[in-house]
Amino acid sequence: MPTGGHRKVIRVAVLDENDIFRRGLVACLETDEAFLVAHEARAGPVPEPVDVVLASALAATGLAGPGPPKLICGEPGRTDGRLPDGPADTVLSRTGLTEEQVLAAVRATACGLFVGPGPTRQGTAQDADAGRDGVLPERMKDVLRLLADGYGTREVAERIGFSERTVKSVVQQAQRRLGARSRAQAVAEGIRRGII
């Protein structure tokens, strides 16, 4: 929160076993003076106090328990590590991740907000607008492209590394955003609008 005209700097620890991905996260954070990368490593523990731990699912396995909120960069539905427990612990997809998403997610996590896909969320006006404008998350576009290529739910799940349940949820969200009554109509609408 701003105090005396200055924003509070958010101290972040970045943990990821993939050196290139970790350096990319650090580079994103360093573009905004609101963030300070206080610690960077392949895995925990985090030796100094931080406001947010930004980690891969694998690197976060040893961080369960109390402490700063953890923003996990992983793929929902994958079993590449146990996610730590806690109300602010959230998941950010590694696939198609942008600098803006990283910065917004870290800022939201520092405030204790939930970040990540909302498969049980009801459609909103914002969702409908996103479909009308042709803006869909990359995950939805990938699923719709595979459906357009003739793959079934199980095959789509295997190809992108999600559970079948997650794929079904993504398809339902795409249908809502595109105003479609069926998978086929969602695919057709995506093609017609040039989204996929």
Image (cartoon, helix red, strand yellow):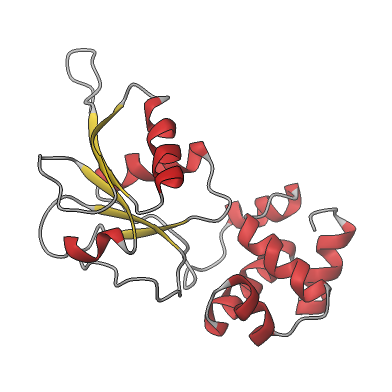
- Residue 41 point in image, percent of width and height: 26, 45
Classify residue 150 by image quadrant: bottom right
Q: What residue is drawn where x is 57% and y is 65%?
A: 123
Q: Is residue 17 something one can see in this rendering?
A: yes
As displayed, is residue 28 above or below residue 145?
Answer: above
- Residue 45 point in image, percent of width and height: 15, 52
Q: Is residue 180 something one can see in this rendering?
A: no
| Quadrant of the frame with the N terminus | top left
As displayed, is residue 6 above or below residue 97?
Answer: above
Q: As rendered, which of 118 and 146 lies closer to the eye?
A: 146
| Quadrant of the frame with the C terminus | bottom right
Q: What residue is drawn where x is 61% and y is 71%?
A: 160
Name of the residue lying farthest toward the right: 192
Classify residue 148 by image quadrant: bottom right
As displayed, is residue 182 above or below residue 71?
Answer: below
- Residue 72 point in image, percent of width and height: 34, 57
Q: What residue is drawn where x is 47% and y is 73%?
A: 120
Q: Classify residue 162 as left or right of residue 71.
A: right
Q: Classify residue 23 as left or right of residue 148.
A: left
Q: Classify residue 143 as left or right of residue 188.
A: left
Q: As rendered, which of 6 and 80 lies closer to the eye?
A: 80
As displayed, is residue 121 above or below residue 10?
Answer: below
Q: What residue is drawn where x is 89% and y is 59%?
A: 192
- Residue 22 point in image, percent of width and height: 39, 44
